[in-house]
Amino acid sequence: MEIALQGVTSAVYPIVQTNGPPPKILIKIPPDLSIIDLKKVIKIVLNKRYNVDGIIISNSTTNHPKNLQSVLLEDGFLSGRPLRDISTNCIRNVYSLSHGKIPIIGCGGISTGQDAYEKIRAGASLVQLYSSLLYQGFPVIGRIKRELVECLARDGFRNISEAVGADHRK
């Protein structure tokens, strides 16, 4: 991963230095990495020489839960609802291991405001939708936003920033 990042940053930054601010670089990781591997990724992300701006904790994996019975999902990537809890736990681990120093985009299984809220409380600064948008269409965005506002108000948060990582401050 370090070699790949060196290649990306050494190719991109000289070009953009003359054309404006550099683009943001985010690393996307699968939600089922071991704690040892998460620590390695966090060390790289926190190393200023790579100029990594955050981590996307992922909406897909090739590891399928044993209880998944769908023939359609036997091979290839798994995404959506089956990843919700795995992804949220990974967000929680990255936030904790990095002491909240890394912006996290949480995705995987978000179909309600409560799902988004759980990822935010675990440490996500932003959330990304895919499967719910694909299956429910654009109206799902407004519904998730309304439900998220209700969750924030219920728990006394004035904005999302106050809720980021709240589970770690209990």
Image: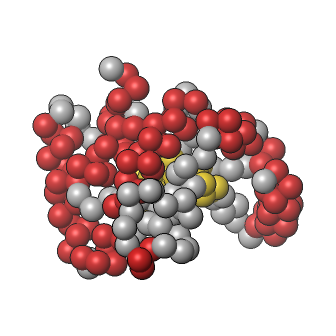
Tally the marks: 0
Q: From the top left corner, tell me how far across and down residue 35 is, in percent.
A: 61, 36
Rendered view: 73 above or below 14: below
User: On the picture, is 134 further left or further right than 75?
Assistant: left
* Image quadrant assignment for residue 88: top left
Depth check: give the residue in front, 26 or 61.
61
Residue 125 relative to residue 46: left or right: left
- State the residue at coordinates (20%, 66%): 142
Residue 128 placement: quadrant: bottom left
Front one among 16 and 65: 65
Point out residue 91 in the picture as x, y percentages from the top left corner. Answer: 48, 43
Pick out the residue farthest to the top: 170
Q: Judge whether residue 107 can be spotted in this image.
A: no
Q: Is residue 78 visible?
A: yes
Give me the residue at 37% from left, 22% from top: 169
Question: Where residue 153 sits in the image (x, y, percent)?
Answer: 15, 39
* Colour approach in the figure: secondary structure
The quadrant of the image that shows the C terminus is top left
Residue 27: x %, y % from top left: 64, 55
